[in-house]
Image (cartoon, rainbow, N blue to C red):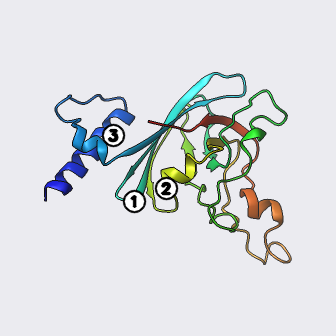
Amino acid sequence: MKKRVVAVVGLITALAVALGMGVSTALASNDARSLLRIGQARLVDPAGVSLGAVQLVELSGRLNVIGKVRGLTVGFHGFHIHEKGECAGRSTPPFASAGGHLRVADDNHPSHAGDMPVLLVGRDGTAQASFTTDRLKLRDILDPDGSAIIVHADPDNYANIPTRYAAGGPDATTLMTGDSGGRVACGVVTGR
């Protein structure tokens, strides 16, 4: 029972920190922190302007993703973890240095480990994300070449193009990217 209580306290601590709420020192005990692995990414646009942050909290074999983003166009945006920890915004196209979607197996979109739910940006240009996945671990993200979180310009179709619309089904681009368009924000994931 004590382990369960410590795990819950740890998750609450991590979520509160991720959301910028702050937590008392007593609650953020060494026991609770030892059960957590935490990653974070500060999202920037191609000019380097800060657009928000994403926290990755691993607890009991599941990765909790919590993010806040601002300054984006209204609507749905693809949201992925990419295979390299590089965010060269001045490259052409921007953030191409992050490579493709993070994969831990030889699979296609939407089954890449780095495929995440789309962001829905409201009229005020902001979006929040909070979900849990068991597709990957923080060690997959923080491998030797690192990883980056990318927000795309367009919605992700999750390679969901019925064969009645396209002879032979989805093309190679759809299978690799979900047709999410350009990369409008990027953040290198770091651990702590």
Residue 61 marker = 1
Badge 1 density bin: few <14, some 14–19, many ≥20, Cα 10 Å: few
Q: CA distance from mark 2 to mark 3?
A: 16 Å
Place residue 42 in its image quadrant. top right
Tell me which numbered mark, 2 or 3, is placed earlier along the sequence.
Answer: 3
Q: CA distance from mark 1 to mark 2?
A: 7 Å
* Farthest residue, direction front: 144
Q: Is disc 1 in contact with disc 2, using a CB cutoff of under 8 Å?
A: yes
Label 3: which residue? 14
Amino acid type at circle 2 is Lys
Label 2: which residue? 137
Q: Is residue 7 visible?
A: yes
Using residue 124 as the reference point, say whether residue 92 is left or right of it. right
Q: Nearer the viewer, mark 2 or mark 3?
A: 2
**Residue under the point 25% across and 43% down:** 32
**Residue under the point 60% across and 28% down:** 71
Tell me which numbered mark, 1 or 2, is placed earlier along the sequence.
Answer: 1
The secondary element bearing badge 1 is classed as loop
